Structure formats: C-alpha cells, structure tokens
Amino acid sequence: MQEAQWWYANGRQSSGPVDLAGLRRLQQEGAVTARTLLWCEGMPSWRPLAELDEVPARMEAAPAQSIEALPSVEASAPRVGDPSDPYRAPETTPDMTPSLGLEGEMALYASVVGGNFPIYRQRWRLDQGSATGTGTWHWPAFLIGLVWMMYRKMYRLAALWAGLLLLVSVIETLLEVPEGLSLVITFALSITTGMFGNSWYLTHCQRQIAQARAVTGGDEARLRSELAARGGTSVIATLAAIIVVMVLATIGAELAG
C-alpha cells in the first residue's frame, strides 16, 4: 500500500508532497510545527498537525512556531485534485464547509467567517484559548476600510465609519484645514482601521454567534446554518460600499471647492 503523501502550509503557500519521514525531518528543522496546516488525499479540508491522529503519533514533538514566521518558498505545482491554497479546502471537495471537522466554539467561528477562517484563527489566537485580535494588523482594513467592512457584512460599523469620514470632511472644510494636515488625518484614520480591524471583526462575529444562538436555541446544525447565512462575505455590499466611497469623495471635493 502506498504511503500517504502530505502537503503542508508554508507561509501563505502550500509545499509538498512529502511522506511521514519527510514530515518528521521538516518538524525537526522547525518548518513543520503542531500548528502547521496539513492535507493529504482523502481529507475534506486542511487541518493543523495537532488535530490529526495518525501523524502526531508517529512524529516527535517540536516547539510550536507560527506559520507566518516560516520562510516563504515556492510551492510545487499541484496536480488535479491536489491543494493549491492552504487556506481553502481542496478543489475535490468544493461543497465542504469551513467548520467541517471542528467542534465547539471553533466550529461556530469557522461557520460565521467562511473560507478565510484559518487566517483569522491565527490572528485571533483561537488555539491559545483566548480570542483576541489586539496587536495584529489587517491590510485590507488599512487600505480599503469602508469597503472591507461592507464586504464582511459589518454594516453597523460601516455606517458609523462613513458618518465619521463625512464629519471629518465637514470639520476640515469649516476650519479650513491645510491639505497636508488633511492627508495626515486621513492616513491616521487608515492606520486606525488597520490596527483594530481584526478586533472589530472578532467582536462582530461574536455578536453574530450570540444572536444566532438566541434564534436557534440548542440546535447545533441549525446554529451553524444560521451563522453561515449571517456571516461570510457580500459582493453586493462591496459594490454598494464603492459607490458610497465615490459619493463621499464627491461631497468632500464639493466642500473643498
């Protein structure tokens, strides 16, 4: 019987395949740790090494190390059916949900986040027993804050943020704030969203979980389904956000003129 071949997450790429002996060597070198995501033929989704039964029993323990701290190398060209992205389920099982194989709170977070859950799982430090997004950076929130909020269905926060941007524009116009200072204020607002984006999204997901629990009672399957409907992303909301940004820019230009 042919030995299983494993792919492993390396940075934001996938590398492999390797056999168990290769995994053991990579673990000794520090390239594979208990939190490294692994996948082989027959698995419905990527799983951390620590959650797999057959692999840890045949490998020596090694110190935990963040995947993002590992050096980035080019991934091998995947064959048909092989994984090409360690943060998505393999192409052979497109109907599998992100929460498959997870239990408890972890499964609920996976249901409400959707396909990018492994990324937020690390950012929120869920495997460390306490959910927190402090001290982490969120590039989409920094670059396209309002659009990202709408994309992630954080409509309440997006409305407040749009109102804040409009208020800042009005105040700058009334006080005749110099253009250079206006750019500094805009940059400071972007830094704020980048610094707190993960924490804001965590709070949003926790609120959705609490509300879904109140609606579904103790029905676990219905709870996950409700969270999947409430969470995930919205392309329509993203397009609406782009329009809002264009409107705000037009209003800002009119006020400045």
Image: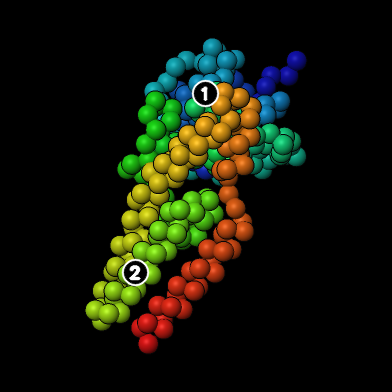
Residue at (71, 38) in percent of width and height? 94
Using the image as rendered, state which of residue 30 and residue 91 is in the foreground.
91
Query: 155 or 127: nearer the eye?
Result: 155
Instruction: Estimate the x, y position of residue 230 in percent, counting from the top left.
Output: 57, 43
Tell me: residue 56, above or below residue 94.
above
Q: Position of residue 99 (x, y in %)?
A: 59, 31
The relative height of residue 231 versus residue 16 in the rendered view (above or below) is below
Q: Where residue 7 appears, x then y in whole percent?
A: 61, 31
Q: How is the image coloured?
A: rainbow
Amino acid, disc 2:
Leu
Q: Which mark is residue 104?
A: 1
The quarter of the image holding the N terminus is top right
Asked if residue 181 lies left or right of residue 204, the reply is left
In the rendered view of the protein, which quadrant contains the C terminus? bottom left
Tell me if 149 is positioned left or right of 16 in this view: left
For discs 1 and 2, the disc positioned in front in the rendered view: 2
Q: Position of residue 130 (x, y in %)?
A: 37, 29
Q: Is residue 223 above or below residue 246?
A: above
Residue at 53%, 31% in the rendered image: 213
Q: Quadrant of residue 102?
A: top right
Q: Residue at label 2?
A: 167
Q: Is residue 139 visible?
A: no
Against 186, residue 128 (above or below) is above
Helix, strand or loop under label 2 = helix
**What residue occupies the far top of the structure in this picture?**
57
Query: In this orientation, which residue lies closer to the viewer: 139 or 56?
Result: 139
Q: Can residue 177 be seen at all in this image of the molecule?
A: yes
Q: Is residue 36 left or right of residue 192?
A: right
